[in-house]
């Protein structure tokens, strides 16, 4: 079972500044000049199809210097709250795994056939 991938995108125009330019550069690998253009655009995708841990770390680094970013789940298409909390449980648009397996959800238990057969995923308990 494959984990969902996440996208980190700008959530608005951020004023340029040395710390912001360097943070965008560290996260994306772009040059400082291209990082400035990205900050000016306000709607660019900084990282696409990355694991949850990488998306979360990148968002935390960018928010720390004042860059407005949004982290979206690639499966359920929901945006994670800025405070790092999980989204409320609800229907997930993911086709390949149950809603409870989406890291964007705050569900802690699952009764899908995978969890019944192999045991609960880390952080989950059986219902």
Image (cartoon, grey):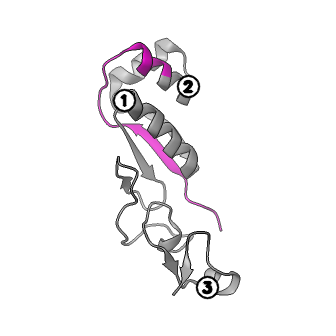
* Residue nearest the observer in this picture, 108 or 71: 108
Quarter in which the N terminus is drawn: bottom right
Q: How many angstroms separate mark 1 from mark 2 (CA)?
A: 13 Å
For the residue carrying disc 2, how many other residues have a C-alpha within 10 Å: few (<14), some (14-19), or many (20+)? some
- Mark 3 and mark 2 lie on one chain; the one further toward the N terminus is 2
Instruction: Name the side, left or right, on which 4 lies relative to 104.
Output: right
Q: How many marks?
A: 3
Which is closer to the viewer, label 3 or label 2? 2
10 is within the stretch colored magenta: yes
Assess whether mark 2 and mark 1 are in contact (beta carbons under 8 angstroms): no
Please tell me the numbered disc located at residue 96: none
SS label for mark 1: loop
SS label for mark 2: helix
* Residue under the image location 43 percent in, 18 percent down: 19
Which residues, given as a range, are shown in magenta?
1-22
Residue under label 1, please give it.
Answer: 67
Quarter-of-image position of residue 12? top left
Assess whether mark 2 and mark 3 are in contact (beta carbons under 8 angstroms): no
Q: Position of residue 64 (x, y in %)?
A: 40, 32
Assess whether mark 1 and mark 3 are in contact (beta carbons under 8 angstroms): no
Residue under label 2, please give it.
Answer: 26
* Residue under the image location 50 percent in, 61 percent down: 103
Q: Position of residue 113 (x, y in %)?
A: 61, 85
Q: Position of residue 47 (x, y in %)?
A: 52, 38
* Residue under the image location 70 percent in, 81 percent down: 118
Residue under label 3, please give it.
Answer: 113
Q: Position of residue 17 (x, y in %)?
A: 37, 14
Q: How many angstroms separate mark 3 from mark 1 (CA)?
A: 41 Å
């Amino acid at each position: 079972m494959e984990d969902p991938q996440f996208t980190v995108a700008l959530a608005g125009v951020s004023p340029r500044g040395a710390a912001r330019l360097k943070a965008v550069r560290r996260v994306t690998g772009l040059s400082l000049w291209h990082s400035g253009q990205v900050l000016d655009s306000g709607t660019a995708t900084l990282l696409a199809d990355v694991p949850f841990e990488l998306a979360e770390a990148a968002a935390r680094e960018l928010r720390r210097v004042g860059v407005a970013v949004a982290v979206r789940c690639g499966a359920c298409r929901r945006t994670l709250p800025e405070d790092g909390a999980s989204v409320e449980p609800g229907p997930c648009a993911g086709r390949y795994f149950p809603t409870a397996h989406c890291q964007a959800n705050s569900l802690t238990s699952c009764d899908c056939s995978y969890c019944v057969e192999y045991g609960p995923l880390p952080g989950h308990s059986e219902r």
